Amino acid sequence: MHRLTHVLLGCFITGAFFVMSISAYYVLRGQHLAFARRSFTGALVLATVCSIAVAFSGHRQAQNVYKTQPAKLAAFEGHYETGRGDLTLFGIPNPTEERVDYAVTIPGALSFLVFDDFTFSEGVVGLDKFAEEDRPPALIPFVTWRLMVGIGTFNIGLTLLACVFWWRGSLFNKRWLMAVFVVAFVGAVVANQAGWIAAEVGRQPWIVHPPVEWADDGSIVTGPDGVVAYDESVALRTADGVSKAVAAEQVLGSIIMFGLIYTLLFIVWVIVLNHKIHHGPDDIDEDADLQGDVPDGGLRGFFAAAIDRAGRRRSMTEAHGSKSSRGSSGENSGGDA
Ligand code: HEM
């Protein structure tokens, strides 16, 4: 449920940033202004709430990962030695020397994150508790984890800043901020991909991770040689996950086929989207704005706008229906008359 919540929030963030990107583009070009401002504001509310929520859900998720896949969390943080957990902001993991080079850290912040420990000192299990062959690769989880959390933090700052300007009534005059929002959706897409890569590569060398045993004092249960002795009868190593039924060429063939189909779909999507963006919103909305039917300058609620829109559609359909029934059926037109 933690993972599902986190991923759904990531989807909402991406969708909201996407809407803000197109709206900001219209604002910069001075097109469809009433529509763009309204859609930007709605998406901004969603993006702000979800950007804050995803950090909380990610925090809970990290605690969950620590319990079920502690080597993954240690790899995320380049935490080699069991003990106080420092949070590394930047650095380059060096698995040979079992340290992070050029590390800039916040001392004890990992202990706080894992245990909500306000003493910033509680011991966090490090990679030293895992045999060499049971450790995830060092670089990819470390980098992708930072990318996701970094973009998530940036999104919180960006959306809150936009909310402040909106509150002051100057949001849409800040052209530099609109320009940032035009491209900021890329960050949301990258954060999703990075989170997924961190989760999958960080789980290696397992497809099905073995259970982890914890002692009552919170320490991890290890074997006689001081490292975790997993019960592999209830696990599956990635190296053992090779299908006996499907040949390598078949796998390659289907990857190429999916690659081509998705490339084609991507091209179609870009063309259709580009067309829609240049076409702009339906006339029905533009009419509403131009005729001054929006009393407060275009910042009405979604429901009012939707009801209004549905009403217009209905009256257009009815007008059209009565016109065509008069035209097509003599009986009906006689009856109507
Ligand atoms: C802001 C702080 C964030 C924290 C602390 C955080 C934390 C986490 C953690 C711990 C995982 C690993 C899950 C696992 O291995 O089970 C994860 C995965 C993931 N995160 Fe984040 N995250 C953050 C921001 C974001 C943002 C901004 C997005 C997207 C917009 C995002 C999207 C994802 C995705 C798609 C996954 C993969 C989940 C899966 O495959 O189940 N995260 N995140």
Image (cartoon, rainbow, N blue to C red):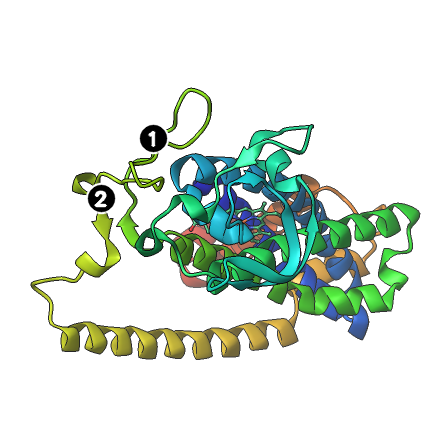
First in residue order: circle 1 vs circle 2: 1
* Quadrant assignment for the N terminus: top left
Residue 27 picture location, percent across and down: 79, 67
* Mark 1 lies on residue: 213
Please indicate whether residue 257 sits to the left or right of residue 21 in the image: left
Residue furthest front as drawn:
225
Residue furthest top as drawn:
216
Disc 1 element: loop
Asked whether mark 1 and ligand 1 are closer than 8 Å, the reply comes as no
- Is residue 139 placed above or below 168 in the rendered structure? below
- Is residue 36 placed above or below 228 in the rendered structure? below
C-alpha span from label 1 to label 2 = 14 Å
* Mark 2 lies on residue: 235
Please indicate whether residue 202 sits to the left or right of residue 288 in the image: left
Which mark is nearer the camera, 1 or 2?
1
- Is residue 173 placed above or below 276 in the rendered structure? above
Residue 271 picture location, percent across and down: 51, 79
Residue at x-position 64% and y-position 76%: 278
Disc 2 element: loop
Quarter of the image holding residue 171? Answer: bottom right
In the image, 107 versus 67, the foreground residue is 107
Residue 237 picture location, percent across and down: 23, 53
Label at residue 253:
none
Residue at x-position 44% and y-position 47%: 128
In the image, 188 versus 71, the foreground residue is 71
The amino acid on which the numbered mark 1 sits, given as a three-letter code, is: Glu
Mark 2 neighbour density, 10 Å: few (under 14) some (14–19) many (20 or more): some
Residue at x-position 69% and y-position 59%: 20
Residue 104 picture location, percent across and down: 70, 56
Residue at x-position 49% and y-position 64%: 139
